[in-house]
Image (spheres, rainbow, N blue to C red):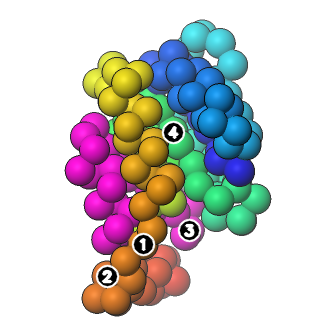
Amino acid sequence: MIALGSDHGGYALKEEIKSYLEARHIQVKDFGAYTPEAVDYADIAYPVARAVSSGECERGILCCGTGIGISMAANKVKGIRAACCSDCFSAKYTRLHNDANILCMGGRVVGPGLAQMMVDLFLETSFEGGRHQTRIDKIAAIEREQ
């Protein structure tokens, strides 16, 4: 199950991604926004991040105007590694090297076709582990200290 969410700036892109995933028979849980009316990105990022960190959802996808604000909010949740990406290379390598569990994109930055390619790479790429696991462990240690 993939957790989806957006603020108003990412609403149209989230809806495109939702339709794309459902057409591929990938189960989604939509945490809003449910209309293009203004909503604060933190109010959406938090429940998506909690769903991913708790294991309720395997991964998450969040959208706001740029992808930056919503990624910052999601990263406040322990165990979340949300990455703001606007290209395919970053979407792939954030999984391969960073074990990112939430992909963030900007509805005013990324078009639907590019978003679909990025979603595919994010969902189909496995974490490489090895030397990268040491780095993820260091991030987890920082979280434990807080």
Q: Which image quadrant for residue 20?
A: top right
Q: Which mark is residue 127?
A: 1
Decide: is 112 above or below 93.
Answer: above
Residue for badge 3: 78
Crowding at dot 4, Cα within 10 Å, few <14 / some 14-19 / many 20+, comes out as: many
Q: CA distance from mark 3 to mark 4?
A: 17 Å
Q: Is residue 55 visible?
A: yes
Decide: is 92 above or below 105.
Answer: below
Crowding at dot 2, Cα within 10 Å, few <14 / some 14-19 / many 20+, comes out as: some
Secondary structure at badge 2 equals helix
Q: Residue at x 70, y 55 (%)?
A: 57
Labels 2 and 1 touching (C-beta < 8 A): yes
Q: Which residues are magenta?
A: 75-98
Amino acid type, label 2: His
Q: Earlier in the sequence, mark 2 or mark 1?
A: 1
Relative horizontal placement of residue 5, taking residue 123 as reference (left or right): right
